[in-house]
Image (cartoon, rainbow, N blue to C red):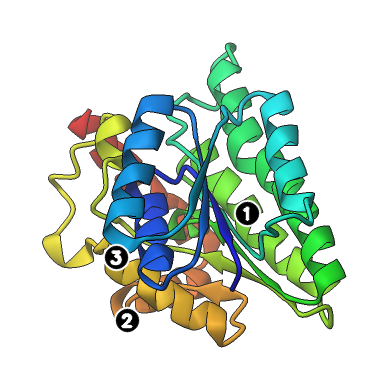
């Protein structure tokens, strides 16, 4: 691969993808909001792995910023042939809230930006006849807790739909659906995770390696680890009424941890 662009590329799963590609000698384009943190992480990758790391400071809640990243994906100079749509955050606002500002931010970053960048990457990569698009979803898409679950359900369906449209072009699309991952994601959301058993937590670096193996095989969906594959299989086969009850229990536990 020539170059990988990763949104939310300085922390958590995004940083794990960046490290995995850098260790393989793949040049990077890292996209993130925090300029200082972005440059610090890029410098560490350059020094440790000797790869070229381009940085783009962009807040994906801003549509002009989305367009700048889309233009970079479309560029033929130093072409990008791997896109990792990873940027995201927990949407904690109630579906009954009158104030939709948090929901709007979630839609911009995890729906519109994913759609915008996926389309730009798909067009550019199909012109060149090769490429990978990885959209980071979540096993939470299979439950019905909140708008985050709903958004990630959209990401999964969108990814498979985009893959259908790109069939035969040399471009593959994979939806990554992790379970709970040990990153700063939960702490940023104010979720302690103390009630979650240790065996359910995933290591971000291992998760990324399993995902990349699935991507190389052309799999449309990647669910890292046997335990989460089993959990996802059970959730898909469970009557929706029972899923709703389980979702209520999980939501109650999460609210107690805040």
The percent position of residue 2, horizontal first and vertical second, equals: 61, 68
Which SS class for mark 1?
helix
Q: Residue at x 25, y 64 (%)?
A: 202
Q: Which mark is residue 155?
A: 1
Mark 3 or mark 1, earlier in chain: 1
Q: Marks 3 and 1, Cα distance to the nearest angstrom?
A: 22 Å
- Quadrant where the image shows the C terminus: top left
Q: Which mark is residue 238?
A: none
Q: Kindly report the distance in space between the C-alpha atoms of the residues bearing marks 1 and 2.
A: 22 Å
Q: Which residue lies under the disc numbered 3?
A: 205
Q: Nearer the viewer, mark 3 or mark 2?
A: 3
| Residue drawn at (59%, 44%) of the image | 151
Q: Earlier in the sequence, mark 3 or mark 2?
A: 3
Crowd around label 1: few <14 · some 14–19 · many ≥20 (10 Å):
many
Q: Earlier in the sequence, mark 1 or mark 2?
A: 1
**Answer yes or no: do the residues labelled 1 and 2 have beta carbons within 8 Å?**
no
Q: Is 102 situated above or below 47?
A: above
Nearer-the-camera pick, 233 or 215: 215
Residue picked out by circle 2: 226
> What is the secondary structure assignment of the residue under circle 3?
helix
Residue 16's x, y, as percent?
35, 58
């Amino acid at each position: 691969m020539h170059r990988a662009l990763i949104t939310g590329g300085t922390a958590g799963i995004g940083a794990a993808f960046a490290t995995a590609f850098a260790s393989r000698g793949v040049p990077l384009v890292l996209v993130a909001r925090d300029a200082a943190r972005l440059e610090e992480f890029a410098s560490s990758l350059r020094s440790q792995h000797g790869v070229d790391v381009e940085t783009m400071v962009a807040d994906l809640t801003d549509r002009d910023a989305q367009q700048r990243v889309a233009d970079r994906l479309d560029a033929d100079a130093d072409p990008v042939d791997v896109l990792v749509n990873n940027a995201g955050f927990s949407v904690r606002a109630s579906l009954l809230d009158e104030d939709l500002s948090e929901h709007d931010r979630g839609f911009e970053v995890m729906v519109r930006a994913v759609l915008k960048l996926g389309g730009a990457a798909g067009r550019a990569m199909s012109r060149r006849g090769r490429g990978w698009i990885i959209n980071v979803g979540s096993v939470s898409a299979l439950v019905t807790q909140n708008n985050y679950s709903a958004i990630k359900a959209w990401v999964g369906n969108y990814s498979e739909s985009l893959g259908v449209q790109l069939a035969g072009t040399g471009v593959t699309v994979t939806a990554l659906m992790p379970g709970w991952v040990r990153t700063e994601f939960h702490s940023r959301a104010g979720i302690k995770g103390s009630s979650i058993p240790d065996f359910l937590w995933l290591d971000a670096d291992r998760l990324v390696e399993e995902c990349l193996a699935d991507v190389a095989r052309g799999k449309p969906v990647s669910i890292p680890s046997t335990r989460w594959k089993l959990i996802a299989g059970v959730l898909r086969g469970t009557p929706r009424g029972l899923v709703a009850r389980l979702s209520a229990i999980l939501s109650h536990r999460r609210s107690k941890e805040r």
